[in-house]
Amino acid sequence: METEIRGFDAHTARLAKKYISAGDVVAFHTETVYGLGADARNDDAVRKIFTLKGRPADNPLIVHVHKDYDLSQLIDGEPSYAPALRKAFLPGPLTIVYPSIDKVSRLVSCGGNTLAVRVPSSPIAQEFLRAVNVPIAAPSANLSKHVSPVTAQHVYDDFQGKIPLILDGGACSGGIESTVLDCTEEVPQILRAGLVTREMIASVAGDCGVYQMAAGEKPKSPGIAYKHYSPRCKTALFAPDCIAGALNLYDEEECSGGRAYILCESALISVINGRRMLDLGATGEEMANRLYFLLRDGERDATLIIAIKPKEEGGVMDGVLNRLVRACGGKV
Ligand code: TXA
Ligand code: MG
């Protein structure tokens, strides 16, 4: 199969509609990361997504709809704070988990009684979703465990010859996946941190919890339990005050014939001289925007990426640090 990368126009809309109706999988731009989409009502199409990605069968998918889609077709009720959250943050990088049974293929939510729904703000995603006018189940368009894609080329690198079409909207401005928010209980609870922060949600809903998986518990959002976001080279992560350790490891890697890179915030770039560097930027938004791009870029040349954890915490940094730690195998 040939994989076409196309911008959005009337012809592309017809192609996308044709593929989705036939149960095929189409990749598309969103403001967070690229998605790998199929008709959420079609068991075989949804199964294809899991197979293509090599995704564990117990990790549910997010359903994507355009901004005028009738939500009542997808959910079974909602808490009283949910409409205000939609008004404040949608379309945008917030995924809401609602009570829902049997509205789409059971494979989407892995047989559970909730459904994650997202209304992306990317104009390409909106046009695509409007053209097909069906709920589109879509995980990030990367092979399972690999770094999420933030350009059409990243999608192509993972799925060349395996999907017919990538809807190219350029680089993703957000750069990390949407915030996943459980709205099935009295107080909303963040299952996955992202660009819509706890503070932002609490300011609208009155309160907002953050889910912490207890030891031995079955996770509420299975995706958070898996190894994730990893580049194809070795990685290491150092605490902000362990720069000397990071530089030692860099020199060891170079001495043994490897190619090391240091990934760190802009403030450290001028402190660390004469080494290969990947510049994460200065603010939370900048670091979110650059992180996956740099990991994908770095892995093409590096044998080892050594990350130094940025100092800032809270807000958008919660999402950035969560991805960075997991990209580096989970330990500092
Ligand atoms: O920004 C995004 O959310 C991107 C773009 C393509 O929209 N999508 C994305 O999908 O990141 P994925 O499949 O890579 O991550 C979905 C996350 C997983 O952690 C999954 O466990 C969780 O959402 N999830 C999906 N449905 C859920 C549900 N019903 N209850 C709890 N967690 C759910
Ligand atoms: Mg993913």
Image: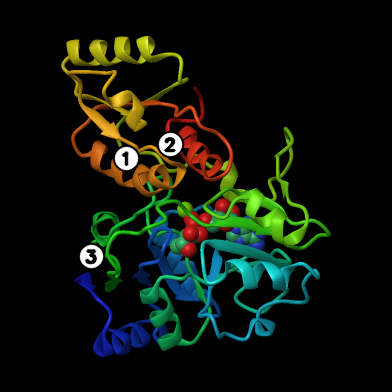
Say which mark, if any, is on residue 93: none
Q: Earlier in the sequence, mark 3 or mark 1?
A: 3
Label 1 lies in ligand 2 vicinity (Cβ under 8 Å) = no
Instruction: Indicate left or right for 174 with 253 as reference.
Output: right
- Near-viewer residue (319 or 2): 319
Residue 99 seen in render: no
Q: Residue furthest right?
A: 186
Disc 3: which residue: 161
Relative to 302, say whether 219 is above or below: below
Residue 47, visible in the rendered structure: yes
User: Label 1 neighbourhood size at 10 Å, few (<14), some (14-19), many (20+)?
Assistant: many
- Dot 2 or dot 1: first in sequence order is 1
Q: Picture coordinates of residue 329 (x, y %)?
A: 46, 30
Q: Position of residue 74 (x, y in %)?
A: 66, 79
- Please say if the residues under marks 2 and 1 sit with CB atoms less than 8 Å apart: yes
Q: Nearer the viewer, mark 2 or mark 3?
A: 2
The CA distance from mark 3 to mark 1 is 23 Å
Residue 327 disc label: 2
Q: Quadrant of residue 82?
A: bottom right
Give, as a three-letter code, the residue at label 2.
Ala
**Upstream in the sequence, badge 2 or badge 3?**
3
Q: Amino acid at mark 1?
A: Leu
Image quadrant assignment for residue 97? bottom right
Query: Callout 3: 10 Å neighbours few (<14), some, many (20+)?
Result: few
